[in-house]
Image (cartoon, rainbow, N blue to C red):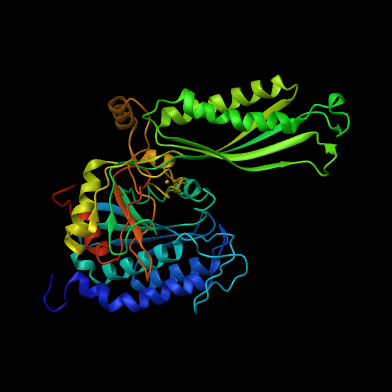
Amino acid sequence: MSKTQGTWGDEVAKRLEGMVALRRDFHRHPELSFAEQRTSHIIAERLTTAGLEVKTGIAKTGVVGILRGDTPGKMIAWRADIDALPLTETLRAPFTSGTPGVMHACGHDGHTAIAITAAEILAARRKELPGTAVFIFQPAEEVLAGAKPMIEAGVLEHPRVDEIYGLHLTTQDKTGTVNVRRGPTMASGDGFNVEVTGKGGHGAYPHLSVDPMTAAAHILIGMQSLVTKEVAAKETVVLSVGQITAGTKNNIIPDKAIMRGTLRTFDMDVRERMLGRLQSFTSDMARAYRAEAQVELTMGCPPVVNPERETELVRACCIDEIGADSVLRPEHRPPLRTRHALDPPGRAADLRADLRRLAGPADRRARRRRHNRAQPVRGVPGAAGAADHRRCDAAGTEHSPPARPHAVGYSGTASFLIRSASSSRLI
């Protein structure tokens, strides 16, 4: 590091105000999944100005920036998600969402601003960069739909990515801390719709009807027994129903009742077993009340599992930047949130499962034998750094969907990518 150039911390410091302003601009102009036109344009413009090779229009609104260093090294990717949520913001601030019914409530504005800034810092010091940094800006993370088409478009193959990392802003941890977790980090996330069909009729003559609401109610209650009676206590599963829709009037028995919910777990075998039992249990229970039930599964993403080696690299980088006291090492089971993968690394992760293609078949078989269950290839979902008043997650993984540790501050992002690409002591 040249003394005339200053430290990496200096690079961040002089861009901090601009990065916060960029985050607030994205927050002020949120865009929904696959409609991130303005956001993508700004990303592409900033990366092009910084001298990166830029590819746009990937999976509709995705952007990839490629920065080739002046010396050989690994292909290290950094992923950020860019879409907002269909929510109305109540915060009163100069940068409050200006789009009715849409807001950045999940931190993607910060993820995007941080990743752009990291790319600009590395581009300014390209001569110190060994290998290649690939910045992936993924659309439609919130609907778990952006990762797969980006992977299918070759963002992990052209160039071939060796490892992928990311982090995620969070309000779960104390400001100024980083939460780095190895192993299961974010839960799988799958949705299900249950349609119970009976026979409608007048409320005064229930014996002439087949009440789908009664069947649905018993299905709902019985679902919890799948968790308590059919899953080992050491495993973690959350099955939640968030919506029940039926009927039009208080004295009419409807002919249909619809339930919608989610299933989350950290284990692939448990996930597959529970999804199968959910279908058979629902059907059998409905028949007990002379009704019929159909289950439609919306397969989301597998759990995020952070490999030890890459996680320790992230931890070491964080300790270097903010000190050991600010880097958390949680020993408890992580919360059952999921994150969207190519998200390549899970709140449910959109790209996680597909990141498996980063590892070869032999590698996948070996890992499956080792853990006695199928796991996603290593990776990290999320984006880089922390912005403004927000807190964040940071995690690293080699070939699988990204996991998400939590961190505040972005000072470590650029130096972390440098150390990763140069095959530091931990890789």
Residue 131 image-quadrant placement:
bottom left
- Vertical placement of 183 versus 38: above or below? above
Front position in the image: 69 or 384: 384
Residue at the extreme left:
3
Front position in the image: 127 or 324: 324
Front position in the image: 183 or 378: 183
- Left or right of residue 355, residue 222 in this image: right
Residue 395 image point, x, y percent? 30, 51
- Left or right of residue 328, residue 184 in this image: right
Residue at the extreme front:
204
Residue displayed at 32% across by 52% down: 405
- Vertical placement of 401 versus 178: above or below? above
Residue 140 image point, x, y percent? 52, 54
- Left or right of residue 327, residue 86 in this image: right
Answer whether residue 162 is visible to the viewer in this image.
no
Position of the N terminus, as image quadrant, is: bottom left
Residue displayed at 84% across by 32% down: 200
Residue 228 image point, x, y percent? 47, 27
Report the number of numbered marks: 0
Answer whether residue 330 is visible to the viewer in this image.
yes
- Vertical placement of 267 versus 395: above or below? above
Residue 124 image point, x, y percent? 26, 72
Residue displayed at 88% across by 32% down: 204
